[in-house]
Amino acid sequence: MITFTKMSVTIMLTAVLSTIAQPQKDSSSEKRPQFVIATSIGLSEAKKDEDKPYMFSSILSADFDLEGNIYALDYKEAGIKVFAPSGRFRGRFLRPGQGPGEAQNPLRLRVSPDGKRIFVLHQNGFQIKEFDGTGNFVHIHPLPKQMFGYFDFLDDDRLLFVDGLPFGQKSYANLKVYAIREHKFEKEFAVTNKDYFTGFQRFVVREGIVWTCPGDLMGLQAYDLKTGSWQKTLALPEKYIPFKNIRWGQNFQKTRLWNYAQPFECAGNIYVLVTRQQFTPEPQGLLDSPLSRRTTLYRLVGEWLVKEPDFPAFDFYPEFLSAQNSRILISSSPYDLYPRLVVLELR
């Protein structure tokens, strides 16, 4: 049996009243982490020689290493520029050509998981060239077929590729696992008969699940990496507008892409960046620049995609390139006046 004294009851009552009197913390007022601009790289003109490395002709791909250094692939120059996390130019390697330290029509680059190797997809997607962290040539990896799409590392010896519909075929596997040392595709999955826009499609691999948003679809799809089986599709809270092909002039056809979504992982969360575009009723030229572009960020919370407020606004049309830890890389689009790179940090 427990016996309470008058004094103990008084102390307990005082404690309870004190707790009630304390102002309760409003969880809704807590400051949420937000993406802020940490570094901006790019100049419209070089007023002195030391400004020249900060000018680009066409940023097609970029990635981080483990120290946060930035490797940016300039497509037209067929060169890779290296910048410190602060944005300071550190050097460059690669040049046009077919020699060991050269690349022909380079499309994309990725830094290996150990941060010590750079892989460049070139020769119009038929080869991958491997370089060490200082830009010295290491090896050529021939591909069994032409690959245009995005790729990333699953581990030190395997890559995951996004593939498109081959000419003349009615169905294909949208995702392919490539064994670097054996020079072969060891697995193919996500079979479809839709011709996706592989230039925009990205993926995130987390706990054995591949998350991707194929083509211009407004949905986040999940596949089991081990079995290749489809798991689920989570709809984005965005109206889907199918792409449209418009014939322009005698010999040209333009594809209007109204929307597309790109998943990435940052600070332990999966995000999806949705891009929406508006165009004139008819193409105004070969470039067919959008009238406007809007980006909206969503975060995966359980089975829902929740809109993240206060994503930074830009004075250019942003394109997502890469993510690492709490940082992501954004570039300007080919429609903008001059190419730029921006590092966003989650703070």
Image: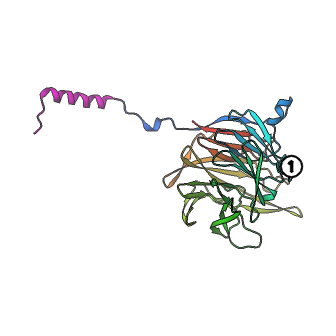
Give left or right: position of 222 versus 28.
right
At 33% from the left and 29% from the top, the residue drawn is 22
* Amino acid type, residue under disc 1 in the picture: Pro
Q: Quadrant of the N terminus?
A: top left
Give left or right: position of 135 versus 326.
right
Give left or right: position of 14 versus 200.
left
10 Å crowding of disc 1: few (<14), some (14-19), many (20+): some
Task: Depth check: give the residue in front, 251 or 141.
Answer: 141
Task: Reply above or below: 99 against 142.
Answer: above
Q: Is 171 inside the magenta-drawn segment? A: no
Dominant secondary structure of the residues highlighted in magenta in the image: helix
Q: Is 10 inside the magenta-drawn segment? A: yes
Give left or right: position of 15 versus 169.
left
Residue 297: give x, y in percent of width and height.
60, 47
- Residue receiving disc 1: 96
Residue 246: give x, y in percent of width and height.
79, 62
User: Which range is magenta?
Assistant: 1-22
At 82% from the left and 55% from the top, the residue drawn is 283
The image quarter in which residue 167 lies: bottom right
Residue 152: give x, y in percent of width and height.
66, 54
Task: Reply above or below: 148 against 135.
Answer: below
Q: Quadrant of the C terminus?
A: top right
